[in-house]
RNA sequence: CGGGGAGUAGCGCAGUGGUAGCGCACCUGCUUUGGGAGCAGGAGGUCGGGGGUUCAAAUCCCCCCUCCCCGACCA
C-alpha cells in the first residue's frame, strides 16, 4: 500500500518542505498580524535549549544578563546617522498612547544599541569599570515585507550582547571571542552545524559598525544562512551617547563598544541544515527530547517494561519521553516522533519482549536493531554521542561537497548557484558585488587564506565566500 | 506601493439566486495496534465586514478589511 508522503519532498520544492516541517512538527505558525509568529511548545522547547546552551557560554565569556525597555524615544535612533539610515524603513512606531497623541513617538526596539548606550554612559566612570559586558534576552521588531517563519519575522526573539572596552584592541578581541567561543562553539558542538566564521564586506556591514563578523552556515539546498553576527562598533556609539571613562592617566577617553546577536532564526537553520524528507532531525546535544520510549501494544508486560525503561534512561541522564498512548496506532505515533526529529526511539512491543528484546531506531540514519532490555540504558547515552558526531560529519561533508574553488568571478557565480564558491576577494572587491547581485549572489564573508578572520577587507590575499542566501 | 489571486467548519476545498456541503482532523462506542487503522454514530458555520437589489443572496451590485504569489523595497 503506497503511502502518500507526509511532507513535500525536499527535491520537489524546498521552501514548501520547510513550511511543511514547521507545521507538521508543531514548531510554529503565523500570528494574526502580518509577519508575526506563534511559537508552539515543541518549537519553543528547542529555542529554550538554544538559550540555555548559549547562556552558559555567554556567562563564561563574562557577560551578565539584564533587561532594557521595549519602547525607545525616537530621538535616540536619530542620533547616530548611519544607524538610523539603516533601520528607519523597518521601524515600528507608537504615536498614540493613553488616549492621546504622544509628543515624541516611541520606537519599538529593532535592537537596543541606542538605549543601552545611554545607560552605559551613566554607569561607566573610570577605567576600573571596564570592560562592561552586558547581554539581553528579549524580543525585537523589524518591519519585514517578506516574512518566513523563524527565518525572517517582524517580531523575533534573540539575545543581544553589548559591551564597552578601554581600547580598540579589547573591543575587537571581544567581538572575535564571542564569535569563536560562544557562537561557533555552540553551533558546531551543539547544533552540529559547521559554520564559516568570517568578516562581512562593507556592503553587508551592520549600520553603525566599523566591522561585522558573522557565522555562515550551508542549508540542505546549498543556500547560506547567517546564523549569528558580532560587531565591533568602534567609537561610533560612544561619541553619540557620550560613553567615556577616566583613564589611569586622568584623561577622559571614549569607550570602544561591541554588539552581537543570535535569534530564533537559528531554529530555521536547524531545520534546513539537518532536516530530511521524514521531517526534522534534532542533534542529541540540543534535543529537548533525546529518546522516546514508544509502547507498541500493552500486552505481555510491554507497558510495564516501557515505563521502567523510561525510568532507567532518565536515571542514565537521558532526556526521555514515554509514549504509551496506545489508543493511537503505532505507525501514527512513530511518524509523529520522526517528524519532530527525536534522535532515538526505543520501540517496546510484546513480540520482541518475549525474547527479552526491544528495538532501537536512529532518527538520523533510520537504522533499527534489536537490543536486550537490560542493555538499553547503558547503550543509549553512547548512541547519542555517536549520532551527534555523525550529524556534524554529515553536515560538514555536505557543505564541502558543495563548495567550489573558483578562479574567475563568472565561475564563482556558477558555483554559488548551488552552494558556496571560494574566490579571491581581489577579483570581486572593486565593483564586483554589483555584478553578483544580478544573479542573486552575495559575498557571505571574507577569510584569510588560512581560514582566519581578516583585520580589514584590504588585507592581501583574502578569500571571499559567495553564495545565494536566505 | 504596482500587477495577479483568494477569503465558506480547526485545516484543505466544492458550492453561479431557492433548507450549508465534502475530505482530513475532533467526540462516543466497538474492533484494532510491529510504519499515517477500520466500521458505526455524533458535534461543529452570524459563508471576512458593511450597505444595496430581490419574495428569496455564500451566489448579483457598491464600499471596506485581511491574507497569499510576482515585482519593487529590505537583512
Image: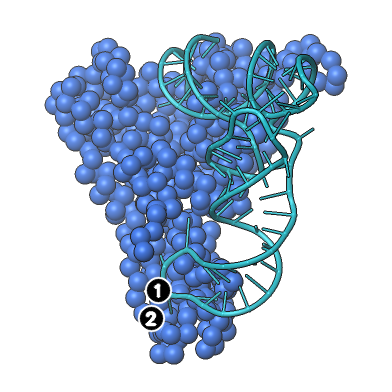
Chain colours: A blue, B cyan
Tell which circle, 1 or 2, labels the residue nearer the N-terminal end.
1
Tag 1 near tag 2, CB within 8 Å:
yes
Quarter of the image with the N terminus of chain A in it: bottom left
User: Residue A262 location in percent, x, y?
Assistant: 50, 38
Which label is found at residue A55? Answer: none
Subunit of mark 2? A
Quarter of the image with the C terminus of chain A in it: top left
Residue in the foreground of this view, choosing between A63 and A340? A340
Which label is found at residue A360? Answer: 1
Task: Name the element at disc 1.
Answer: strand
Subunit of mark 1? A
User: Residue A421 location in percent, x, y?
Assistant: 23, 32
| Real-space CA distance between mark 1 and mark 2, rounded to the nearest whole angstrom | 7 Å
The answer to whether A78 is drawn above or below residue A213 in the figure is: above
User: Residue A438 location in percent, x, y?
Assistant: 29, 17
Which label is found at residue A371? Answer: 2
Q: Image point 55% across, 81% down: which residue?
A: A298
The answer to whether A346 is drawn above or below residue A103 in the figure is: below
Other-residue count near label 1 (Cα within 10 Å), few / some / many at <14 / 14–19 / ≥20: many
Q: Image point 26% across, 47% down: which residue?
A: A398
Answer yes or no: is residue A193 visible.
no
Q: Image point 14% across, 26% down: which residue?
A: A407
Residue in the foreground of this view, choosing between A284 and B7? B7
Q: Is residue A189 left or right of residue A257?
A: left
User: Residue A52 location in percent, x, y?
Assistant: 56, 51
Count how many numbered circles sit on residues in the image.
2
The image quarter containing residue A381 is bottom left
Task: Name the element at disc 2.
Answer: strand
Residue in the foreground of this view, choosing between B73 and A185? B73
Other-residue count near label 2 (Cα within 10 Å), few / some / many at <14 / 14–19 / ≥20: some
Amino acid at each position: 500500500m503506497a503511502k502518500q508522503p507526509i511532507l513535500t519532498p525536499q527535491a520537489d520544492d524546498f521552501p514548501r518542505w520547510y513550511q511543511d516541517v514547521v507545521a507538521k512538527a508543531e514548531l510554529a505558525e503565523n500570528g494574526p498580524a502580518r509577519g508575526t509568529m506563534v511559537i508552539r511548545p515543541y518549537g519553543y522547547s528547542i529555542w529554550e535549549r538554544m538559550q540555555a546552551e548559549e547562556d552558559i557560554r555567554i556567562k563564561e565569556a563574562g557577560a551578565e544578563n539584564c533587561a532594557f525597555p521595549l519602547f525607545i524615544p525616537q530621538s535616540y535612533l536619530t542620533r547616530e546617522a548611519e544607524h538610523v539610515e539603516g533601520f528607519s524603513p523597518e521601524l515600528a512606531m507608537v504615536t498614540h498612547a493613553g488616549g492621546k497623541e504622544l509628543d515624541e513617538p516611541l520606537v519599538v526596539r529593532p535592537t537596543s544599541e541606542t538605549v543601552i548606550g545611554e545607560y552605559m554612559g551613566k554607569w561607566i566612570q573610570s577605567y576600573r569599570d571596564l570592560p562592561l559586558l552586558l547581554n539581553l534576552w528579549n524580543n525585537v521588531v523589524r518591519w519585514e515585507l517578506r516574512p518566513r517563519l523563524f527565518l525572517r519575522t517582524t517580531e523575533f526573539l534573540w539575545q543581544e550582547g553589548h559591551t564597552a572596552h578601554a581600547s580598540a584592541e579589547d573591543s575587537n578581541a571581544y567581538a572575535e571571542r564571542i564569535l569563536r567561543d560562544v557562537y561557533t562553539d555552540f553551533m558546531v558542538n551543539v547544533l552540529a552545524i559547521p559554520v564559516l566564521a568570517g568578516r562581512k564586506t562593507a556592503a553587508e556591514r551592520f549600520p553603525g559598525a566599523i566591522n561585522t563578523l558573522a557565522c555562515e552556515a550551508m542549508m540542505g539546498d546549498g543556500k547560506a544562512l547567517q546564523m549569528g553576527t558580532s560587531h565591533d562598533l568602534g567609537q561610533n556609539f560612544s561619541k553619540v551617547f557620550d560613553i567615556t571613562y577616566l583613564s589611569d592617566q586622568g584623561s577622559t577617553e571614549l569607550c570602544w563598544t561591541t554588539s552581537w546577536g543570535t535569534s530564533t532564526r537559528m531554529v530555521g537553520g536547524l531545520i534546513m541544515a539537518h532536516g530530511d524528507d521524514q521531517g526534522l532531525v534534532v542533534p542529541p546535544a540540543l534535543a529537548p527530547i533525546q529518546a522516546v520510549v514508544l509502547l507498541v501494544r500493552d500486552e505481555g508486560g510491554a507497558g510495564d517494561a516501557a515505563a521502567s525503561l523510561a525510568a532507567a534512561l532518565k536515571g542514565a541522564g537521558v532526556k526521555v519521553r514515554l509514549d504509551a498512548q496506545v489508543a493511537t496506532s503505532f505507525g501514527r505515533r512513530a511518524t509523529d516522533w520522526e517528524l519532530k526529529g527525536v534522535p532515538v526511539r526505543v520501540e517496546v512491543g510484546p513480540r520482541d519482549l518475549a525474547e527479552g528484546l526491544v528495538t532501537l531506531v536512529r532518527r538520523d540514519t533510520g537504522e533499527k536493531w534489536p537490543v536486550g532490555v537490560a542493555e538499553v540504558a547503558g547503550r543509549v547515552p553512547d548512541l547519542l554521542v555517536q549520532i551527534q558526531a555523525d550529524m556534524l560529519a554529515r553536515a560538514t561533508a555536505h557543505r564541502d561537497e558543495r563548495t567550489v574553488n573558483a578562479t574567475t568571478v563568472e565561475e564563482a557565480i556558477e558555483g554559488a548557484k548551488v552552494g558556496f564558491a571560494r574566490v579571491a576577494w581581489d577579483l570581486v572587491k572593486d565593483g564586483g558585488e554589483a555584478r553578483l547581485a544580478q544573479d542573486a549572489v552575495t559575498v557571505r564573508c571574507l577569510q584569510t587564506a588560512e581560514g582566519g578572520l581578516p583585520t580589514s577587507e584590504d588585507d592581501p590575499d583574502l578569500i571571499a565566500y559567495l553564495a545565494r542566501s536566505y
